[in-house]
Amino acid sequence: MPAEGGAGRPLAPRRLAPAPAARLSVAAARERVLALAAPVPGHETLPLMAAAGRVLAEDLPAARDMPPFDTAAMDGFAIGPEALDREPPLPLRRRAAIPPGHPDARPLAAGEAARVLTGAAVPPGTAAVIFEEGCRLEGEQVVLLRRVSAGQHIRPRGEDAAAGTVVLRAGRRLGAARLGLAAAAGAGPVVVRRQARIGILSTGSELLPPGAIGPDGRIPAGTIPDANRPMLRAILADPCVALRDLGIARDDDAAVAACLAAARDLDLVVSTGSAAGSEADRLGPAIRALGGDVAHLALAQRPGKPLLLARLGALPLLGLAGNPVAALVGALLYARPLVERIAGLAPSALLGQPARLAQPREAGERTEFLPARLAGEAAGLPLLEVPRRFGSARLTPFAEADGLAEIRPDGAVRFHAFEMLAGG
């Protein structure tokens, strides 16, 4: 049985693979990142009404047939087999109506037609339901004006699933349709994975907490507001995640160590800044000083070339570049899929769709990710507008963007909508 770390987590392998000499492709970097942590163990039982967005921990079988009886699929009249495929007009004796929730156990007699409403149980002996527009009423008779075939407008018992059939597999997120299916299957409380405990941390002595700027707009010389933690919170927020704000760690070994000490019971820390491993970066040295393992990776992408992978005991850490745009791109490409994996979901694939640029742009040696606005279509492909000038600290173009334009060194262009990258 594997040893366990804090909060019942299986201990990760002690050593990280060394950083490769060459720059990693985006696909290779995602593979390295996703290998950093395993899905969380542990589960809890929640009422169905409180389980939206959570990850199912056990297969869910149907507690009963779905539907549990032969049901009228629309308002109309239940008829017996003797009325099938008869030439209209065909008069039948009208029987009392059967509303939903009030089944009538009396068999349908030959020559009878019983009024049924959508969702009502049809009486025994029903061969079909004819919708009300296909009939007319004449006193105590119902006159069929159309031919009717067997089984028409009836939902037979067990049509969706028979009792005992697994209708939802473990590992699926309980979205709207799956919650509806679980309810229809007779589920009460459901067993879901516990929430993944994720910490977000900014590093840098130059950073001020969001909202720290006074009404006069003045701030201490050399400081800037921390834009990264609000972005990380927005990207990583999810019903299957419990986020913890670890604040800002100054470029000081003691400050970084204090933040890491507050994170030892978490399943992952996502940090920004100190990813490159320069002499001013204190995150890597602090982790090593505490006995952890650190790898600084260089990626063949722009923005966000540096990436830090670390383990401190059983705690994995993912360090993103500190420039806001690089942090935003890194969170979408790497942090969000890793959090999904830890939460027990299949990480979102980086697929995108082929696209074209409204204005030609020369491809570089690295894969570029630029803010893109949809500007129509060209040759059946999305047409993207991207800024001519771009910097890894300029968030303004992203505020009006619809997603990321991925421009590969071979000139291929793909579009990644924000809602797809952020768990859409």
Image (cartoon, rainbow, N blue to C red):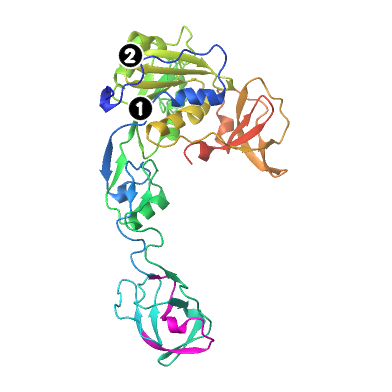
Could you say which quadrant of the image residue 184 lies in?
bottom left
User: What amino acid type should be assigned to the residue bearing mark 1?
Assistant: Asp
Magenta residue check for 394? no
Q: Residue 285: where, in percent of width, then height?
A: 39, 9
Report whether 284 appears left or right of 304: left
Kindly state the secondary structure of the residue where label 2 is placed: helix
Q: Residue 341: where, in percent of width, then height?
A: 41, 32
Where is the N terminus found, in terms of image quarters? top left
Compared to residue 189, the image places residue 13 above or below, namely: above
Identify the residue shown where x is 34% and y is 8%: 289
Q: Can the viewer see residue 258 in this picture? A: yes
Compared to residue 148, the image places residue 331 above or below, namely: above
User: What amino acid type should be assigned to the residue bearing mark 2?
Assistant: Ala
Q: Residue 238: where, in percent of width, then height?
A: 39, 38
Compared to residue 124, the image places residue 403 above or below, namely: above
Report whether 43 appears left or right of 371: left
Identify the residue shown where x is 36% and y is 75%: 122
Magenta residue check for 94? yes
| Mark toward the start of the polypeptide (1 vs 2) | 1
Farthest residue toward the top?
A: 279
Identify the residue shown where x is 34% and y is 27%: 267
Report whether 331 appears left or right of 126: right
Few, some or many C-alpha atoms within 10 Å of disc 2 (few <14, some 14-19, many ≥20)?
some
Kindly state the secondary structure of the residue where label 1 is placed: strand
Q: Which mark is residue 25?
A: none
What segment is highlighted magenta in the picture? Answer: 71-95
How far is the residue under mark 1 from the one under mark 2?
15 Å
Residue pointed to by mark 1: 245
Q: Nearer the viewer, residue 413 or 29?
A: 29
Residue pointed to by mark 2: 257
